[in-house]
Image: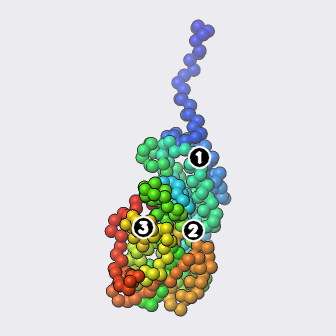
Amino acid sequence: MNPATPAFEGPVCPRPLDHQDQIVMGHGSGGRMSHDLIQRVFSAAFSNPALNQANDSARLTLPSGRIAVSTDCHIVAPLFFPGGDIGRLAVCGTVNDVAMSGAVPLYLTAGFILEEGLPIAVLERVVASMQAAAQEAGIQIVAGDTKVVEKGKADGLFITTAGVGWLPEGRQIGGELAAAGDQVLLSGPVGQHGMAVLAARGELGFQAEITSDVAPLNGLIQELLAAAPHTHVLRDPTRGGLATTLNEIAVQSQVSIRIDETAVPILPTVRTVCEMLGFDPLYVANEGKLIAIVPPEELPAALSALRAHPYGAQAAHIGTVQSQDPGRVLLRTQIGGTRLLDKLAGEMLPRIC
């Protein structure tokens, strides 16, 4: 054998490229690259006893009684915007959905669809934001999954979350429980999230200093329920905004809801941008606000409890529940007239949550 010719040692599989800076298809293979990505990005950030079991499912300890479960998908563009990002949004959105039933959120799972070419530094930043939001909310991210799709098929990053919470015995809160005479509270100004995301896209043609309100509201809700234990309805006015969410409640409970336009808090910047673009802020999405419908005798305590919390400092009493005209939401305008607030007919601002 020619000594210059290396000996044949049989077929050899090519060694995967060790990509450290961006997502490649190999990160979704289930092999070494997948393992390394999980350890480097997800396990390092979300470490907790349930997740560290490293099994196909997490074994969790739950208080006795009922549980509340919710799931949500997040496809916001851009991934980062003033006041938040897709990671904080994913955690807060699901925490809030669980908490609106009166439950105490405990655990989240998270699924990630990663686009080939996504910088790993971006993923690490999103994951760090998720963990910070989870710590603020007092919950743990206990299970997850990742998949990688070809470039151009995921717009960078999609996240799906599911949440589990404990529902205390005897607590009954739901959109079907509003009753005539109940009072409607709003925890703060509306329209910030939708306008902040729109501004971050650079599509306004002018600059606007608007920050998203994305926040976990479970702490605020627990303070509210301690002060107003007979709260009937809790709901976060996300897509479709305040007007659409009130319509959903009115239909569920077969009541009418009458709102005073002058009582609804709206930041001047949000109001100005909406007027310039032809948007109604009552239909713009929020990610850190809640509607609470309480019996009249608990109104003062409920309003005080909301205003005592940082996420409810600008809470307002905005309307009442009535038996006439069931299924409708009516707005008393600034000039003293009345107009019907219907559900949002279509998608006013796509890809905002």
x and y percentages locating residue 7 in the rendered image: 59, 15
Query: Tag 2's secondary structure?
Result: loop
What residue did someone put label 3 on?
274
Disc 3 element:
helix
Q: For the residue marked with disc 1, what is the amino acid?
A: Ala
Residue 66, position as x, y percentages in the image: 54, 75
Residue 43 location in percent, x, y?
Answer: 63, 52
| Quarter of the figure with residue 279 | bottom left
Q: Label 2 neighbourhood size at 10 Å, few (<14), some (14-19), many (20+)? A: many
| Structural distance between the alpha carbons of marks 3 and 2 | 25 Å
Q: Earlier in the sequence, mark 3 or mark 2?
A: 2
Q: Amino acid at mark 3?
A: Cys
Question: Distance of mark 1 from mark 2, alpha carbons?
Answer: 25 Å
Label 1: which residue?
A: 121
Q: Nearer the viewer, mark 3 or mark 2?
A: 3
Residue 151 — which label? none
Q: Quick check: 251 left or right of 52?
A: left
How far separated are the C-alphas under marks 1 and 3?
Answer: 34 Å
The answer to whether one can see residue 183 in this image is yes
Task: Choose between 338 and 144: the one closer to the eye.
Answer: 338
1 vs 3, front mark: 3
- Give the quadrant of residue 333: bottom left
Crowd band around label 3 with a 10 angstrom C-alpha radius: few (<14), some (14–19), many (20+):
some
User: Who is closer to the viewer here, 151 or 183?
Assistant: 183
- Height in image: 233 above or below 13? below
Q: Amino acid at mark 2?
A: Pro
Q: Earlier in the sequence, mark 1 or mark 2?
A: 1
The kind of secondary structure element at disc 1 is: helix
Residue pictured at 56% horizontal, 67% vertical: 215
Residue underneath mark 2 = 216
Q: Where, by quadrant of the figure, is residue 329 drawn?
A: bottom left
Image coords of residue 39 (percent x, y):
62, 47
